[in-house]
Amino acid sequence: MEKREHWGNSLGFILAASGSAVGLGNIWKFPYITGENGGAAFIIIYLICILIIGLPVLIAEILLGRKAQKGPVSALRSLAQKNKTLWVVIGSVFFLTGFIILSYYNVIAGWSIGYVVEALQGNLGTFSNAAEASQFNATLISNPSWVILWQFAFIALGAFIVYFGVRKGIERIAKFLMPIFFIILILLVIWGLSLDGSEKGLSFLFKPDWSTVRFGTVLMALGHAFFTLSVGMGVILTYGSYLNKKDNIFFSGIMIALLDTFIALLAGLAIFTAVFAMGFDPAGGPGLVFNVLPAVFSQMPGGSIFASLFFLLLSIAALTSTISILEMLVSTLMDEFKMNRHTVVILLSISIFILGIPSALSFGELEGVRIFGLSLFDSMDYLSANILMPLGGLFIALFVGWNLKREEVMGELFSGFRDGSGNRKLANSWYFLLKYIAPILIILVFLSSIGIIQ
Ligand code: TRP
């Protein structure tokens, strides 16, 4: 069996895990749901949710991985005190969730690199309104060869990186791409702020309007806090399993959550200053990024350049998330079946490509195929993001809070600093949130997302 790899340093882990967390959720979903849910008021609630639910579960996942030094299924098996079979089933559900998410995430990720190419060819700078841009989008995404070509290209790219392993593949690419990502994002923010009329975007994002806050708003913030940090499917657990015993779990968790939140806010700034300055509708919903933004870019000098940069940003965000899911799948199979990394990467990427084809075609040929009224793509998304992920997060919280002994958990948390100088008070609050508060809140979000409570 191959010896388990480790990150070269904790910066590598923090960048790779932030790369996993920063994805379509930050650049597309966060700005748009913020806009629809009262702007600044929503942001405040969301920050609280990150703090009391997202971060505690994130830290728990890192801790589980680091303690077990294994992928999700093997980790749960080796650490479960009782009901081992049940926990192995739960671990396998993590695997399944990742498999499903990856199959459709790659489709959208494929669109983003496809859009970089379109932008470079100047095809995204010619729209006089959002309707024209959505028409263009509809033509592209219903074209089977375009979608499948880019979906394939994207999977191949992700597989290529994961093929080289943790340190030479994932860590190296994260250290290379995350700074580039950041520079592009800052450029786009400066550009957005420099446009005439950008202040309307600012007040939309940062002036709290509490009158729009409902119970549903809080649940939305809670659900997103969870999704955006990539917790609940063993991906962060897998990344945590490559951590060295001397690394500080608490500090890493806080850094990842901070970076993720900061990047979501910056993305909101870049997008809404531009959308408002150009007089477009901020509530573009799912179509905001692909339908509204190209029209926004068309209205301004140098639009094609900013369009290329923006879609490159989106592609990088999606790529670093994709490889984290693929790595979780790879590590699960390697640990469970003692298989070789290279074989596993190739087998998995081919099967993910095949499973993703129906989702890819669900905007064209297969548009009419519905499961409970949802398109193939939407049903994959609903099943994984609204059902499997919250359940996964609940199980992580229950496992660390109730299955492991308190001393074991604290021992792992403080293994990096044996002198006991770690902040015990902070650790105690974290433990309390994880054991009692997070499970209750996650159950609430779950019940609401499947429509049992409104
Ligand atoms: N956090 C990612 C985003 O914001 C989405 C996501 C959810 C994810 N779960 C994941 C990414 C697991 C990688 C791994 O877009």
Image: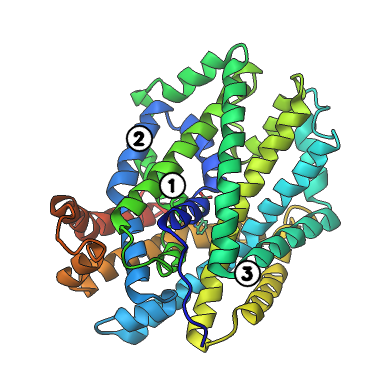
| Residue placed under numbered mark 2 in the picture | 214
Q: Which of the marked residues, 1 or 2, is nearer the chain's N terminus? A: 2
- Circle 2 SS class: loop
Q: Is residue 275 left or right of residue 236?
A: right
The kind of residue tagged 3 is Phe
Tell me the distance, in whole angstroms, between the alpha carbons under discs 1 and 3.
32 Å
What x and y, as percent, mark residue 22? Answer: 51, 48
Tell me the distance, in whole angstroms, between the alpha carbons under discs 2 and 3.
47 Å
Q: Quadrant of residue 48?
A: top left
Tell me the distance, in whole angstroms, between the alpha carbons under discs 1 and 2.
16 Å
Dot 1, crowdedness within 10 Å: few (<14), some or many (≥20)? many
Q: Is residue 221 left or right of residue 373?
A: left
Q: Residue at x 48, y 52 (%)?
A: 15
What x and y, as percent, mark residue 268? Answer: 52, 31
Q: Which mark is residue 164?
A: 3
Q: Residue at x 62, y 69 (%)?
A: 164
What x and y, as percent, mark residue 382? Answer: 53, 57
Dot 3, crowdedness within 10 Å: few (<14), some or many (≥20)? some
Q: Residue at x 76, y 43 (%)?
A: 115
| Residue placed under numbered mark 1 in the picture | 224
What x and y, as percent, mark residue 119? Answer: 79, 37
**Do tag 1 and tag 2 residues touch (Cβ < 8 Å)?**
no
The kind of residue tagged 2 is Arg
Q: Residue at x 67, y 67 (%)?
A: 159
Please state which of the two labelled residues, at mark 1 or mark 3, is closer to the viewer.
3
On whether ligand 1 comes within 8 Å of the CB at mark 2, the answer is no
Q: Which of the marked residues, 1 or 3, is nearer the chain's N terminus? A: 3
